[in-house]
Amino acid sequence: MARLLTRRKFVYVSGIAVAATAATACGGGTTPTEPTAAPAEPTAAPAATAAPAAPAATTAPAAPESKYSEAPELAEKVAAGELPPVDERLPLEPLVLNPVHEVGQYGGVWRQLHMGTTDLAQNSYKTYEFLGKFNPDGVIEPNVAKGWEFSEDGTSITIYLREGMKWSDGAPFTTADVAFWWNDIVLNDELTPAKPAFLKRGGELGTLEIVDDYTFSVTWGEPYGAFYDYLSTARMWQPGHHLKQFHIDYADEGELNALMNEEGYDLWTDLFSAQTAGSNNPGTPDLMPWIPTNFVDAPLQIWERNPYYYKVDTAGNQLPYIDRLERTLLTDAEAILLKAVAGDADFESRRLENVQNYPVLKENEEQGGYRVIMEDNAGSNIGTTFWNYAHQDEYLRELFLNKDFRIGMSHAVNRQEIADIVHKGLTPPSQASVAQASVWWEEKYSNAYLEYNPDLANELLDSVGLDQLDGEGFRLRPDGQRLSLVVTVFDEARTSQIEMAELAKDHWRAVGLDIVNNPVDRQLWIAQTQALEHDMSQYIMGMGHKTQTPIQQQVMFCVQASSTHWAFAWALWYQTDGAEGIEPPAEIKDLQAIYEQCMAETDLEARNALIKQACENHAENLWMIGIVNESDYSRFMVVNNKLGNVPDHIPGSNALAFNVSQMYFKE
């Protein structure tokens, strides 16, 4: 039975009870064994007792029947003595995956297309293993961890690993790997000069306690219930048994220098980092379903099946089903598109998913032998316009703080025209908020002050003291000067920011606002907005979606200056406890207080309710003007028609809420 953790609502235990037998796999190939009943869950061994003397054996005893099955290539290695039996390779309580459609079959090669080091993250979304994993509903469930529980006061989390789990090289995976990561990497100032933010609460790093080989806890000085959100991205381990040979505190100095010379590194820290799990370095043990065997710059990079992978299907078959990955190196995104159209990609989104590519990929589905499957829309708002609330011009600062001015500017924008002209009508008009495919979204958040109503816009602008016009029809400031505003536009062709800004400029000019657009590149845009050397700015706003929560993104709460381009000075004030930045108005302090409550709250439903309060705050105050949301046709996966166990709609973004290890090839 699954271990029962008894701390009321603070408990999450992996649902490892095995479901009823799945349907028979269709198609040919090597079909895994399908018992008529699910394999019994391992139980703790009974207490040892004195054993009676065994009678002399006259025949060799029969080998015990395995409760699990494995890929034929692994069974051959077991028979040849190259691998231990599958029961010994799996943890005592493997993670059991309910199949999307059916129990699959072993075999096949997953073909991927990529552009080298720039696409190192291609598989991080799909194959990396974290403590927890989002399910299709956006709830984080146990993954590498068997379960976790918060203390009653929320200041501590205890995490339970899977007993008997192993690295891809067969070495035990235990809390010793957690301790090595924490003590020898995180706390090592040479390797980690800036400590991970997710490990901090109230600016202070938590404290690690190793309870036993499969249990550890982290404690903070303040309640930290929102640590739950980071379980979906936390990889709190490294293979110490492998990495110590590259670590200055463990390695022989001469041997370490020789390794640095051999690999071409001047610093031991660079050598070490290149060898860590997650770096996709061949030879480094990992927990992923497939492990790279050569480097990413090879013409064809090969990832082989991990024989110690810890997940099984409901029939007791060790995953993954697919034998290996083959990643073809290409020169540019156009080459990737052409090969995908030709049917040379099996499960691919990177460099392909955008509105521009959608039509050509759809048109060639039948010829290419694939289907285009949509992913959840991450809800990014495109063309979002921000004000400089810390403007050096006192009049402009007060004007931007006037909510009626902001609402008037919002009603002046014809969003549907922008969507039709720039995005072929595929991007829905919307204010910036959380993604529609999330538990926090409500229609009123997206629709607040959204209507195109020039008459209302004029009325509101008049009401804030902008009722005087010059000879050209532009509104005047109280000092008699023309109100002229420069919009610093993030020049990004992919999202057509300049085209959108030019149309919005025309809409604002129609209600008497003199607007000038100033397109700049990424570095200059960030520099100017953080230096507060702008009137207004324009880019994208994403407040959170199913597989990246508002707590993880933080931008809606105005608490992290580097990511809060809509109110940098207010966030800096919060981040520095008032030592820097500008003190925000009460409504922004309310947002920051909601964030603090979210961080402490251990109950998921209560935390979600708090996030909705933050969404209400944004909808009511309109801290930024949203224009259009990304298209429902902008995020998708190109999927081989022969690939099974792929849902009709892929949950989350970048397949983060989907287990790729259960995909299989049909005949």
Image (cartoon, rainbow, N blue to C red):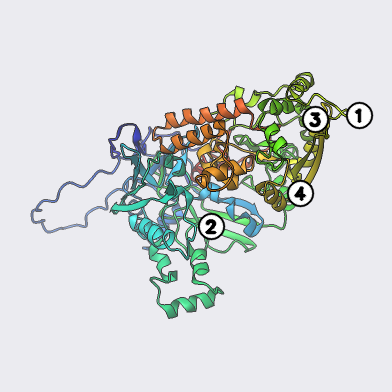
* Residue 555 locus on image (x, y percent): 57, 40
- Report the residue that reaches farthest toward the front: 479
Q: Going from the N terminus, do you reach mark 2 or mark 1 first?
A: 2
Q: Going from the N terminus, do you reach mark 1 or mark 4 first?
A: 1
For the residues marked 2 and 3, what is the alpha-carbon distance in whole angstroms?
54 Å
The residue tagged 4 is: 520
* Residue at the spot 81% in from the left edge and 29% down from the top edge: 507
* Residue at the spot 59% in from the left edge and 51% down from the top edge: 122
The residue tagged 3 is: 508
Residues under numbered marks 2 and 1 in contact, where contact means CB atoms less than 8 Å apart: no
Q: Nearer the viewer, mark 2 or mark 3?
A: 3
Residues under numbered marks 4 and 3 in contact, where contact means CB atoms less than 8 Å apart: no
Q: Amino acid at mark 2?
A: Trp
Query: Is 414 on the left-hand or right-hand side of 262?
Result: right
Q: Amino acid at mark 4?
A: Val
Q: Nearer the viewer, mark 2 or mark 1?
A: 1
Dot 1 surroundings within 10 Å: few (below 14), some, or many (20 or more)?
few
